[in-house]
Amino acid sequence: MNPLFCAQFRPEFRSLALACGLVAWSVSAVADVKPDGGDYQAAPPGTDLLVVYAQHHSADSQYARGSKAAGNLDLGLDVGLLRYVHFTRWGDYIVDPQVILPFGQQKVGLADSRTSGIGDVIFGGTLWTIADMDKGEHLGWSVFFAAPSGSDKNQGFALSNNRWATDLQVGYVRRFAPRWSVDLIGEVEFYQNQRDTGARRDPLLQTHAHLRYHLNDATHFGVSYRHSWGAQDSLDGVAQTNRRNNGNLTLSAATFLAPGLQGMLQYSYDTQVQDGPLTRGIQARLVKIF
């Protein structure tokens, strides 16, 4: 059942609606595939990437207006993603058309429910107006679309948002010292009204800052801070959630396991939540370069 429907029409299910909050909010945590450090570095045209992600996110507490609204929720989301990227040349520019397929399982302990399946397909790409491989300076402009194609679209499955979404990003990467680089990314996401209920979601604004230390050419360590604003949900003009003002910190380690095969491990946790569940998670990523 859609959590917005629960909250408005069945007051006795408010605790369940809070638990279902993970459904609404975890989409921004996983289904949009947050850009990591190095993601805005262009690769030479003709390069292909096959990327596999494995993520586990959990939450026990739900926040509303910056205060804890519920606890002991036992929310969990296990996600896999397959991503294919192809770098090519378009006139004087490098572009990378790509497609992402999420799949996974969510658990809402309070409701004792599990849902699994395929998520909404994401497709799009990046165009680089600066791609200086020697100096390590890159500037890319991205657009991604999420199609309402996943499983259980009307059942509150976190990976199936049952609406079209358009994600615009701009990312700048600079190697400012022999062993240090910084990535700065701005992002805005726009949403179609939800197709089953007509629920409206305001645009989501996000910023991402990554600082990476390069131990050598094969290995780097990173720390990332992300912040998000907006994305308030409303139904028939009545607010169902508050606006986000949320922060997240992520620690990363990446290395080449073999020529053409990179592995990455990450641990992330929310440092500030105005509205939604307070989440923590781990991610493993493998990148095969062809």
Image (cartoon, grey):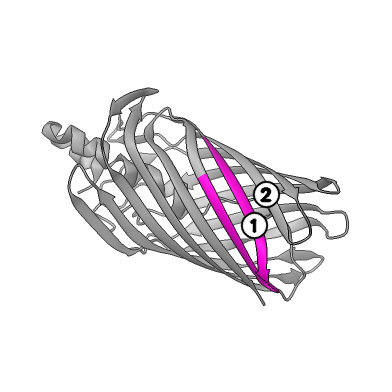
Magenta-colored stretch includes residue 70? no
Q: Is residue 190 visible?
A: yes
Disc 2 residue type (three-letter): Phe
Q: Which badge, 1 or 2, comes first in the chain's sequence?
A: 2
Asked if 67 appears above or below 95 in the picture, the reply is above
Q: Is residue 218 left or right of residue 30?
A: right
Asked if 275 appears above or below 145 in the picture, the reply is above
Give how far across and how far down residue 159 sits, in percent. 37, 56
Give how far across and how far down residue 143 sits, in percent. 59, 55
Give how far across and how far down residue 31 sits, in percent. 45, 54
Tags 1 and 2 touching, CB below 8 Å: yes
Q: Which residues are magenta?
A: 248-267
Asked if 210 appears above or below 115 in the picture, the reply is above
Seen at 78% across and 57% down, the residue is 216
* Direction right: furthest residue: 134
Give how far across and how far down residue 254 sits, in percent. 64, 57
Asked if 65 appears above or below 108 in the picture, the reply is above
Q: Nearer the viewer, residue 45 or 71?
A: 71
Seen at 82% across and 54% down, the residue is 136
Disc 1 residue type (three-letter): Ala
Q: Is residue 151 visible?
A: no
Q: Quadrant of the C terminus?
A: bottom right
- In the rendered image, which residue does mark 1 sit on? 254
Magenta-colored stretch includes residue 260? yes
Q: Find numbered disc 1 in the image and state the secondary structure of the residue it sits on.
A: strand
| Dominant secondary structure of the residues highlighted in magenta in the image | strand
Q: Nearer the viewer, residue 109 or 226?
A: 109
- In the rendered image, which residue does mark 2 sit on? 221
Q: CA distance from mark 1 to mark 2?
A: 6 Å
Seen at 69% across and 48% down, the residue is 171
Where is residue 199, by image quadrant? top left
